[in-house]
Every structure is written in C-alpha cells, then in structure tokens.
Image (cartoon, grey):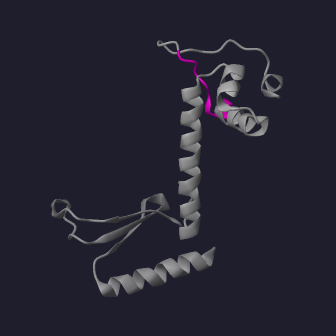
Amino acid sequence: MTVGAEEPEQILSQDTRGRVLVTPERRELLLAEYDRSGMSGMKFTQYVGIKYSTLAYWLQRRREQRRKEKSLVKAGADPKPGRSNGGWIEAVVENASGSGVPAGTLRIYFAGGAYCQISSAAEMALAAELLGRLGARR
C-alpha cells in the first residue's frame, strides 16, 4: 500500500469533538487507495486510522455522485455543474400557484442561471427545438 508513501508523517487535525479532519483531496486519495488495496473496509480503516462509519459514508456519497453523473450524461447534461456548455441543471414542474407561475409550468434551468419556461404545447415544441439545437452544438 502506498498511503503512507505519498505523504510524509503528519499530525492529523481534529475538530472539537475529536474527529479527524480530512481534506477532500486526501479523502479522494484514501478512496482510490481503498479501491486498489483489496482489503475489507474494516481492515483498511484500521490501517489508515479512520472510523469505518466514515469510510462507509464516503463510499455511499461517491456511489450517489456517480449515479447522478451517469443519469445527467444519459440526459445530455453536463455532470460538472457550473460549466456553461448548454446542459441543463434542473427541470422543475411548478405546482404551487403562490409563486406567480401557473401550476403545471415546466422550467428548465441552464448553467449560468438562464431558464426556459414552458406552459403550453406551442412552447413545448419551441423548447424541444431549442434543446435539440443546444445538444447538436456539442
């Protein structure tokens, strides 16, 4: 294993409750090392000095993130938010009339804060053409 070889010995920072603080970069290194190690989760956590529940939480978050990215790629959106490539970020069907938007209205939010609001069949055809052209630009 190369966990210790990649970084010199260090004093681990802790929060007020005694929990070890791990940077996102270090967490990614540890997850990659866990994937390569072939160790059980329990043995790996004992080896690197983190709690098993922490590793389990990291793995669950990574699985959810990958699943989300995979569904965005299938839908034609950019899995990395904030990049302005024409991919949509979110689609919302309004169901509360208190917002000033008619119930049943569909809004597709794009990167950069722009959105497309669809409230009729005619607008749906225009939105489909817009989305098709944005996808073709890629």
The front one of 76 and 70 is 70
Q: Decide: is 129 above or below 45.
A: below
Nearer to us in this view, 82 or 1? 1
The answer to which quarter of the image holds residue 13 is top right
For the point 59% across and 44% down, the residue is 62
Q: Is residue 73 magenta?
A: no
Residue that appears at 27% across and 72% down? 105
Residue in the picture at 74% in, 32% down: 39
Q: Quadrant of residue 7?
A: top right
Quadrant of the snapshot with the N terminus: top right
Image position, residue 70 (x, y; %): 59, 60
Residue found farthest to the left: 98
Q: Quadrant of residue 40?
A: top right
Q: Position of residue 38 (x, y in %)?
A: 76, 36
Judging depth in this view, the residue of 70 and 109 nearest the camera is 70
Question: Residue 100 location, x and y as percent?
Answer: 19, 64
Main SS category, magenta section = loop
Residue 76 appears anywhere in the view: no
- What is the span of residues highlighted in magenta in the rendered image? 19-26
Task: Point out the image quarter for the C terminus.
Answer: bottom right
Tally the numbered discs.
Answer: 0
Residue 2 relative to residue 76: left or right: right
Q: Is residue 138 left or right of residue 97?
A: right
The location of residue 128, given as percent across then percent down, is: 45, 82
In the image, residue 79 sits, relative to residue 40, either above or below, namely below
Q: Where 85 falls versus 34 (above or below)?
A: below
Q: For residue 73, say whether it is visible.
A: yes
Q: Is residue 88 above or below residue 23?
A: below
Task: Identify the residue shown where x is 47% and y is 12%.
Answer: 16
Horizontally, is 131 left or right of 8 in the view?
Answer: left
Q: Is residue 40 left or right of residue 136?
A: right
